[in-house]
Image (tube, helix red, strand yellow):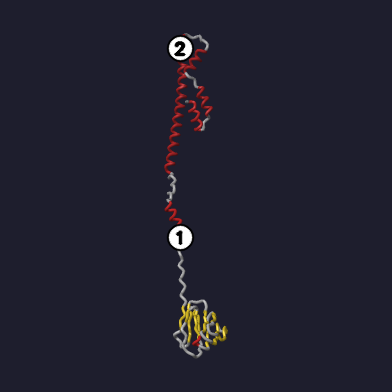
């Protein structure tokens, strides 16, 4: 077990493990000293002197063993101190680094709210189209009608009896003929239209789908329809 520990710590310190093990194996134990003493040839000395020499050799070898063991013990203690310092440094570094924070799990309701916010877009309110109006111009005594909020002028002519009529649309003659009872015609214009009935009591008119009141007269007259562009 001690040899394994020496080899491991020698490797950690960058030392030559084999050399360290050889030095350790070369250390002589008290048993090896006694064997080497018995194997030496007898010397011509008296018994008391021989005993003193053996004791001195044992003392010398014992001193060397104690010295080597003390040195190895010192190395072992140093290794333990270095390992303790490394462990402490690693622990301090790990404590300084904040642990990773996992994002809080979102619930199903929160996911639905996020999806609803993405799906719901602000509605752009479109302005309501202005209502089409047909009014008689009060600023003139002539029969004049103004059509507002329309793309064009549409005149529906109908007759309860025979009547000649002439229609000019945007400066061009669009109609000029005599109609019989229960006949009718439709004429369109972009900006302006004039109508002249020959038999006004037999003539009725709708402008852009709205029926208008006409003068109660038996004499022919000219009716004007103008589209308001504002």
In screen coordinates, is 173 left or right of 52? right
Few, some or many residues within 10 Å of mark 1 (<14, 14–19, 20+): few
The Cα atoms of the two marked residues, 1 and 2, are separated by 110 Å
Q: How many marks?
A: 2
1 or 2: mark nearer the eye: 1
Q: Which secondary structure, mark 1?
A: loop
1 and 2 marks in contact (CB < 8 Å): no
Of pointers 1 and 2, the one earlier in the residue sequence = 2
Question: Label for residue 120?
Answer: 1
Q: Which mark is residue 78?
A: none
Q: Position of residue 97 (x, y in %)?
A: 44, 44
At which x and y percent is residue 119? 47, 59
Is 53 or 201 nearer to us in this picture? 201
Q: Is residue 166 above or below residue 122?
A: below
Residue depicted at x 51% and y 26% = 21
Q: Which of 100 and 181 lies nearest the eye of the viewer?
A: 181
Q: Which residue is label 2 attached to?
A: 51
In front of the other: 229 or 39:
229
The residue sitting at 47% across, 73% down in the picture is: 129
- Residue 86 x, y percent position in the rendering: 45, 36
Q: Is residue 32 above or below residue 87?
A: above
Query: Horizontal and vertical percent for residue 79?
Result: 46, 31
Within 10 Å of the Cα at label 2, are there few (<14), some (14-19), or many (20+) other Cα atoms?
Answer: few
Judged from the image, the secondary structure of the residue bearing numbered disc 2 is helix
Q: Is residue 199 above or below residue 79?
A: below
């Amino acid at each position: 077990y001690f040899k394994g520990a020496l080899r491991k710590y020698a490797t950690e310190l960058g030392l030559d493990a084999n050399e360290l093990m050889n030095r350790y194996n070369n250390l002589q134990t008290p048993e090896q000293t006694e064997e080497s003493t018995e194997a030496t040839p007898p010397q011509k000395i008296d018994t008391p002197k021989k005993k003193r020499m053996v004791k001195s050799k044992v003392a010398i070898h014992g001193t060397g063993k104690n010295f080597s063991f003390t040195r190895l013990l010192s190395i072992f203690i140093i290794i333990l101190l270095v390992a303790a310092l490394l462990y402490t440094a690693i622990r301090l570094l790990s404590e300084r680094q904040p642990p990773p924070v996992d994002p809080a799990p979102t619930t199903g309701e929160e996911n639905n709210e996020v999806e609803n916010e993405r799906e719901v877009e602000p509605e752009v309110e479109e302005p309501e189209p202005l209502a089409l109006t047909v009014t008689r111009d009060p600023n003139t005594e002539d029969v004049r009608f103004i059509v507002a909020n329309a793309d064009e002028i549409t005149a529906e002519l109908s007759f309860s009896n025979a009547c000649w009529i002439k229609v000019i649309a945007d400066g061009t003659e669009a109609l000029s003929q005599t109609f019989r009872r229960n006949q009718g015609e439709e004429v369109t214009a972009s900006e302006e239209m004039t109508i002249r009935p020959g038999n006004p009591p037999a003539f009725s008119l709708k402008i852009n789908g709205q029926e208008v009141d006409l003068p109660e007269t038996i004499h022919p007259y000219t009716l004007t329809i103008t589209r308001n562009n504002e």
